[in-house]
Amino acid sequence: MTKATRYPLWEQFAPPGVFGDPARTAVRAEGTRVLFADGRWRLCGTSGLWNVNFGYNNARVADAIADTLRTASYLPVFRSAHQPAVDASRALLDLAGPEHFGRVVFSTSGGAANDLTMKLARQYQALRGEGRRRLIVGLTGSYHGTTYGSHALTGEDLGQDMYAVDRRWVRHVAHDDPAELRRLMAAEGDQVAAVVVEPVLGSGAFPLPESFLTALEELRREHGFLLVADEVATGFARTGLAFASEAWPMRPDLLLASKGLTNGTCAAAVVLVSHDVCETYERHNAPLMHGETQAGAPTTCAAIIASIDELERLDAPRRARETGKLLEDALAALGGHPLVTGHGGVGCFQALRLGTDGQRLPQFHVIQTVGALREAGLTVQPGPGCVQLIPTLVYERSDVEELASLLRTGLDLAAQRLASAPAGPGR
């Protein structure tokens, strides 16, 4: 390869050695399937990174964006406002509960929204005269993004030390150990500004246990931190509710949404802010020092409103519950496979757990398994010792049956290769 012929795209989270693979280069998409440059249509088991809740090429969302491009191609919410942003904010509050949430802050990604949230929480505490509250608590194994702030909050090992990510003001506790959370609060609770949790951990599809949620609410009342629901992955009916935190015994102070927000059509995220937090800022007439040029653009707002309309038109929460049950049954039927150790998740947010010889499958081999599934005709995402299955909410029974068949074919291929492979990384 010469400099002139070097492949031009730097693919995210991929080593350069696999750049440009036709089997991984999408050409177009429709409904529940994606066409790749190798000429094969593959069933999408990821909703395009959890984004495409209402199917690829959803005409209603596309038409809404196209109409807005012709009437208001770009308008900012940076020291100003525009009517599409006001309308989208109202629609979001109506969806999430206007009795609890009072305002919407626009962002452009889940990672940037987490950065915004950490700033908002720290300023909120400072406005209340509690400027010492600067710590943000997240969960071990969580994923909140890889912008500089969210990379610190992410509880997976994703090279934070190599990138000199500043984690001095972040703490992590296990998602299933209330005692660990209590110990942290006993030691540093008077310095905690917020606790940020995913209702279902995005890496591995682990729901938060009720015991953890109970402890979280008790400690919030005792210590006064803000509770943040990062619903970037779980929002917009993914788990069978408009937002997964609706199943909690309490409401979060802040709620983040992104992936299903525009059906994946725009770089968009939002933070929904409770009335109590809004009122603190209002008492001090305090601006939040955060701005993103493309946040809340008119096209984004049109896509948000159209996506909310689709959620309601398709009765997406019901479909997610029904499809999720079919998916759970399909995964349970794979329980006797030599690579499968179990499964878990909620609704259309599931993980198939993998292992051999009583041990979790090393990540090197998880990636190989993802490749084998792609060869079989199914796209999935790797997780820690698992493959993640995040189907669109417009899957039909036939799609689930095809997914189950492709899973078995791909797992058989992966097991065959693993059995015949020489010892390598992770073995």
Image: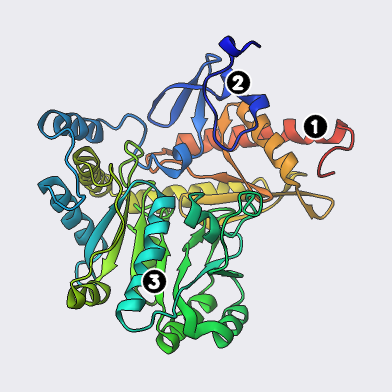
Above or below for 331 versus 229: above
Give neighbour class at mark 3: few <14, some 14-19, many 20+ (Cα, 10 Å).
many
Does residue 196 appear in the picture of this structure? yes
Distance (Cα) linking label 3 and label 2: 44 Å
User: Residue drawn at (21%, 61%), measured in percent from left and top?
Assistant: 93
User: Tag 2: residue type?
Assistant: Asp
Direction from residue 297 to residue 220 in the image, left or right: right
Does residue 248 appear in the picture of this structure? no
Residue receiving disc 2: 21
Give the secondary structure at mark 2.
loop
Residue 393, image x and y in percent?
Answer: 39, 43
Residue receiving disc 3: 122
Direction from residue 412 to residue 217 in the image, left or right: left
Q: Quadrant of residue 266?
A: top left
Give the secondary structure at mark 1.
helix
User: Residue drawn at (85%, 37%), measured in percent from left and top?
Assistant: 424
User: Tag 3: residue type?
Assistant: Arg
Camera-nearest residue between 197 and 386: 197
Label located before the other in sequence (2 or 1): 2
- Tag on residue 362? none
